[in-house]
Amino acid sequence: MGGVAFAPFPYAFRYGWSEDETVEFCLRELDRLLVTAAPAADVAAFVIEPVLGEGGYVPTPPAFLAGLRERADAHGILLIADEVQTGFGRTGKFWGHQHADGATPDILITAKGLASGFPLSGIAASEELMAKAWPGSQGGTYGGNAVACAAALATLDVIEAEGLVANAAEQGLRLRDGLQKVAADHPGIADVRGLGLMVGNEFCTPDGAPDAAAATRAHAAAADKGLLLLTCGPHGNVVRMIPPLIVTAEQVDEAAAIWADAVRS
């Protein structure tokens, strides 16, 4: 898309550095970008996911989000958080960006978990910022669907009443622990990462190259055993797990056991 510039994302596993080193490098490259290909005076907004979704289930380091907020404030740039996958408790906090102190976005976009399957999406921003848009510029054919809005309100009630954000945090730790034990026995799984109930297993060859074929085989084996998963990442070598917020400890343990069997086979 014209007018869009991409800065390096702090994917520490890919670079082979510590998280601190990776964040420092990526912020330095962003600063360079803001004086070269995308001069700061011409930049309207930074757009980022608190956890990369299709990009491989990679959490954005809190220090990087804080660095974006700092640069956005310094240059008069808006910070937009894409919380379509991370919102509504998915990461163990209500919003994914809340894992980083002081990195509140100017604009937040959300969907998916908002209405428990009903088609609904939304944008949130301050009244002052929203008032800058032309009247009617944020409409759409299906905007304001009353049934979807009712489903969203009911969903929010259930999330609060059943403590599902806390459950996502608790069961997410249990899930990662189970998956890390599987990875410890299988060197082909080079990384297990995520926040809350948003966890990825990255498959690599012995020399560190992405191994999409192994990920595909493990994904198919899991499906044969009754565990339905998806792959993601630019190379398709990450098997992602994103169970519902109501998942129980017993179900997490069952999934980890099936996954271990699938990877073994």
Image (tube, grey):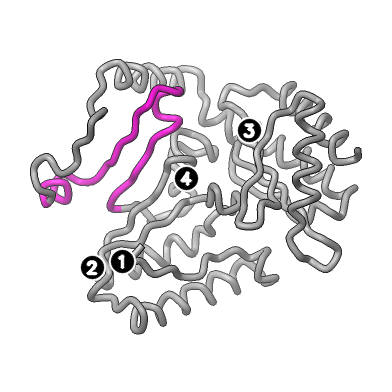
Q: Name the kind of residue labelled 4 in the image.
A: Gly
Region in magenta: 106-132
> Which residue has dot 2 on it?
76
Q: Could you tell me which secondary element the residue under label 2 belongs to?
A: loop
Q: Which mark is residue 170?
A: 3
Res. 72 mark: 1
Who's the residue at 61% across and 66% down the image?
19
Of mark 4 and mark 3, the one earlier in the sequence is: 4
Dots 2 and 1: beta carbons under 8 Å?
yes
223 left or right of 24? right
Q: Which mark is residue 8?
A: none
Identify the residue at horizontal 16%, vertical 46% (top origin).
Answer: 130
| Alpha carbons under labels 4 and 3: distance apart | 15 Å
- Disc 3 or 1, which lies upstream in sequence? 1
Is 236 situated above or below 64? Answer: above
Left or right of 217 on screen, residue 79: left
Which amino acid type is shown beneath numbered disc 2? Gly
At 24% from the left and 45% from the top, the residue drawn is 125
Disc number lying in front (3 or 2): 2
Residue 203 in picture, x, y percent from top left: 76, 53
Q: Which residue is mark 4?
A: 96
Residue 131 inside the magenta-drawn segment: yes
Q: Secondary structure at mark 3?
A: helix
